[in-house]
Amino acid sequence: MRTAQFKKTEREKVDRMLRKELKTTLSVPEPAANEYIYGHRKHGCLEVPLAAEESDLNLIDTAFKLLTSRDDSLRELAIAHFVQTVRLRLGRDSSDDDLGAFISGEIEDDFARTSNKLSNSWTVARSATRRLNVE
């Protein structure tokens, strides 16, 4: 999940199949609300994580951990790669504000005029932040 080997759509398929099997195993009618499966245990639910949502959280967490690593050389390498990704996306040197806007999934101003055909840790984390509305 941390390296985006599978697309989110594939994880959503797993979630749908798992939901159906859980309802069958638990003798819960298919049209029944899904809150019982995904709700919190304190409320008497099963608290089964959604693979698609969990993968997005892992992508964001991975980017954060790379940028804040205790290993100086790893952190510097990650920051350099992140800055390079944003610079290539913008076509110019990036400021700290540009870096924050990029990783928060900003799609306006400078980011509205460009797109990126390539995928890396930063672009998938950016997509995940946009889907989960995380800044």
Image: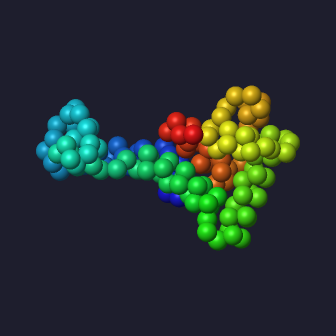
Q: Is residue 95 left or right of residue 66?
A: right
Q: Is residue 42 at least partly visible in the picture?
A: yes
Task: Farthest residue to the left: give it.
Answer: 27
Query: In the figure, 90 relative to 57: above or below?
Result: above
Q: Is residue 13 left or right of residue 34?
A: right
> Residue at 67% of width from left, 31% of height from top?
107
Q: Is residue 35 left or right of residue 103?
A: left
What colour scheme governs how the chains and residues are painted in the rendered image of this protein? rainbow
Residue 84 percent location from the top left of the image: 79, 52
Residue 97 percent location from the top left of the image: 73, 40
Residue 133 percent location from the top left of the image: 52, 36
Looking at the picture, tell me which residue is in the foreground, 41 or 131: 41
Task: Farthest residue to the right: give it.
Answer: 92
Residue 92 percent location from the top left of the image: 86, 42
> Which quadrant is the C terminus positioned in?
top right
Looking at the picture, tell me which residue is in the foreground, 27 or 106: 106
> Residue at 56% of width from left, 58% of height from top?
62
Residue 65: quarter of image: bottom right
Q: Is residue 2 left or right of residue 42?
A: right
Residue 110: quarter of image: top right
Looking at the picture, tell me which residue is in the foreground, 18 or 94: 94
Q: Is residue 131 at least partly visible in the picture?
A: no
Query: In the figure, 47 relative to 133: above or below?
Result: below
> Residue at 44% of width from left, 46% of height from top?
52
> Residue at 13% of width from left, 44% of height from top?
27
Q: How many marks?
A: 0
